[in-house]
Image (spheres, grey):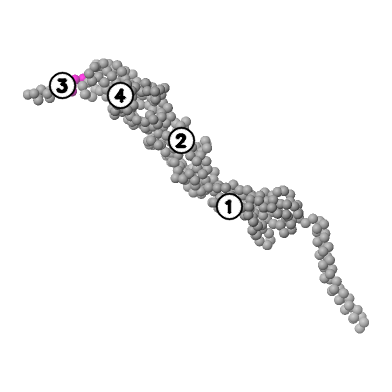
């Protein structure tokens, strides 16, 4: 008999408006949120309670397990100027939090108090689980060699952003997706060029003002644009000539080799960034510099240097040649004269 009366009392209490029934509740949209630091969180929130009651207080708080006493976000110094309660004391409990910080990550609940003195408070638990993330650029290696491939990933540190997020890439503050492959949160450079070296950052469209920190990409490449300069620009015979080799390379050039080409072949002259010599007749030819770094080598185009004999040198040379010819011809002429005289005597 006593048991039957007890069951009847439980049923009676459950049927009373607002006693552990479905008339109490809080609905959050979304229940989970992944947001970037610096962005804004908006929670669409509604709540219900027995219609005969009035709401006398409502607030949001962080850390739902604490019970929510005296933890109103609007009173929390950490959220000063960043929290806006968009709800009312009837059914709306929407919330906006601006300029999110990584320390804002956690669970948030809405709590309201009604005019009923007994069991007149309600907390919407579990609440909204917020993860505040920052972006960072990840790559397998920060140093690559020209011609290789490298993929940069825009990584969200605390949570996975929406699949619909559009990622933007910048290199040294300029858009970096020209002639490159982008897919979701990755940027692929294939093949890598020396022009790809620089600092890369990424951002999400709509949150461009909150990009990732810049990450450097270093590209190693063989010497390029190797060239030879001649000083003085007008070379005179017997004068001092200085050849200088210059090249664009990373790592920097550590060795230079000089060659001279002429009709007899190609000859290695020496090493060093500069080469000095006094111009002589044997120095005519095409001069080439080969630059070396850790990656490889690159040759310059040839620079022609010609020994121009002066007019007096040509005249003197001609006189010498004529004199030699005269000496060679003279014995032959004398012999011819002697043979002619002998024949006449006969």
- Residue 301 percent across, percent down from the top left: 64, 52
The mark that comes first in sequence, 4 or 2, is 4
Q: Nearer the viewer, mark 1 or mark 2?
A: 1
Task: Tell me how far mark 4 sits from mark 2, CA to CA.
Answer: 35 Å
Circle 1 sits on which residue?
A: 292
Q: Tag on residue 212? A: 2
Query: Is residue 155 inside the magenta stretch?
Result: no
Residues in magenta?
13-17
Task: Tell me how far mark 1 sits from mark 4, CA to CA.
Answer: 70 Å
Q: Dot 2 lies on which element?
A: loop
The image quadrant where one finds the N terminus is: top left
Task: Tell me how far mark 3 sits from mark 1, CA to CA.
Answer: 94 Å
Residue at image coords 44%, 41%: 138
Circle 3 sits on which residue?
A: 12
Q: Is residue 89 visible?
A: yes
The mark that comes first in sequence, 1 or 4, is 4
- From the viewer's perspective, tell me whether residue 276 is left or right of residue 322: left
Q: Is residue 176 visible?
A: no
Mark 2 Cα within 10 Å, few/some/many (few <14, many 20+)?
many
Nearer to me, 165 or 111: 111
């Amino acid at each position: 008999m006593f048991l039957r009366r007890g069951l009847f009392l439980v049923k009676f209490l459950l049927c009373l408006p607002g006693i552990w029934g479905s008339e109490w509740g809080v609905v959050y949209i979304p229940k989970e949120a992944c947001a970037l630091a610096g962005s804004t969180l908006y929670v669409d929130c509604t709540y219900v309670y027995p219609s005969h009651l009035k709401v006398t207080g409502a607030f949001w708080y962080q850390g739902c397990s604490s019970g929510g006493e005296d933890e109103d976000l609007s009173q929390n110094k950490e959220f000063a100027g960043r929290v806006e309660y968009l709800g009312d004391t009837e059914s709306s409990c929407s919330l906006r939090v601006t300029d999110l910080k990584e320390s804002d990550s956690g669970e948030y609940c809405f709590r309201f108090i009604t005019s009923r003195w007994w069991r007149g408070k309600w907390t919407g638990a579990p609440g909204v689980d917020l993860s505040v993330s920052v972006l960072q650029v990840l790559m397998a290696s920060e140093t690559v060699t020209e011609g290789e491939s490298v993929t940069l990933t825009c990584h969200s540190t605390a949570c996975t952003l929406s699949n619909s997020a559009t990622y933007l890439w910048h290199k040294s503050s300029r858009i970096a997706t020209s002639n490159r492959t982008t897919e979701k949160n990755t940027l692929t450079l294939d093949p890598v060029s020396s022009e790809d070296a620089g600092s890369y950052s990424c951002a999400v469209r709509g949150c461009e003002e909150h990009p990732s920190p810049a990450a450097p990409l270093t590209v190693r490449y063989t010497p390029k644009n190797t060239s030879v300069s001649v000083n003085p620009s007008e070379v005179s015979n017997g004068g001092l000539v200085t050849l200088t080799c210059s090249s664009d390379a990373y790592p920097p050039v550590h060795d230079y080799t000089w060659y001279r080409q002429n009709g007899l072949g190609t000859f290695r002259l020496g090493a060093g960034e500069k080469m000095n010599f006094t111009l002589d007749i044997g120095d005519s030819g095409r001069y080439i510099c080969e630059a070396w770094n850790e990656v490889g080598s690159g040759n310059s185009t040839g620079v022609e240097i010609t020994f121009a004999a002066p007019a007096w040198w040509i005249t003197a040379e001609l006189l010498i040649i004529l004199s030699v010819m005269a000496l060679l011809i003279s014995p032959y002429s004398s012999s011819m004269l002697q043979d002619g005289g002998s024949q006449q005597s006969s």
